[in-house]
Amino acid sequence: MSTFHANRRSILLAAAIAVLSGYATASGPVSVADTMAATAELSTLSSLVAKAGLTDTLKGTGPFTVFAPTNAAFAKVPAKTMDELAKDPEKLKAVLTYHVIPGKVMAGDVKNGNVKTVNGANLALSKAGDFVTVEDGLVQKADVAATNGVVHVVDSVFIPPAR
């Protein structure tokens, strides 16, 4: 077989695999952890969830509602704060669980007021028309379906109140 045919066959095989893997992920929702991991703009959050040991929890039964900060949202957090979170797994876990509420809350179901997070602290939710805010952040992409809940992509990282 010529090099041309071997390369062509490799390219066709790679293309077929890419197409088939696209169908596998497009076949339906996956867990909130897998949904975040598969979303490029949530890669920082996904790596922090793994670092905090929360991946298996967020692949669990749920249901969970996750307000998922984008990479740009994490970039706005002061470097000193990110360093502190990197050095203190419990503090990191507290911040991450402050972005999760038990149950599945779609954007259309948001009521103005406080909700209790998995962290135990309250998070302020508000809705005006089609806009949903969480604390001082805005939901940029709502209602990303997952098998065990829903993910709402937000433009801010929320720091829980000191206890």
Image (cartoon, grey):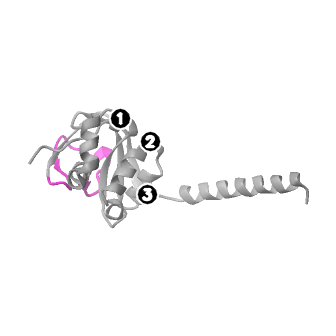
Residue 133 appears anywhere in the view: no
CA neighbours of label 1 inside 10 A, class few (<14), some (14 to 19), many (20+)? few
Which mark's residue is nearer the viewer, 1 or 3? Answer: 1
Residue 140 coordinates in the image, percent (x, y)? 37, 36
Q: Is residue 112 magenta?
A: yes
What SS does tag 1 mark? helix
In terms of sequence position, does the residue under pointer 1 or pointer 3 come before the other? 3
Residue at the image point whose x is 87% and y is 51% from the top: 4
Residue 103 coordinates in the image, percent (x, y)? 26, 58
Residue 108 coordinates in the image, percent (x, y)? 31, 44
Please report the bounds of the magenta region as a residue range: 101-120
Q: Which residue is mark 3?
A: 34
Q: Quadrant of the N terminus?
A: bottom right
Residue 96 appears anywhere in the view: yes
Which mark's residue is nearer the viewer, 1 or 2? Answer: 1
Residue 40 coordinates in the image, percent (x, y)? 47, 44
On residue 41, which mark appears? 2
Please, is residue 137 above or below residue 105 in the view?
Answer: above
Residue at the image point whose x is 44% and y is 53% from the top: 37
Q: Quick one: 83 or 93, which is closer to the camera?
A: 83
What SS does tag 3 mark? helix
On residue 75, which mark appears? 1
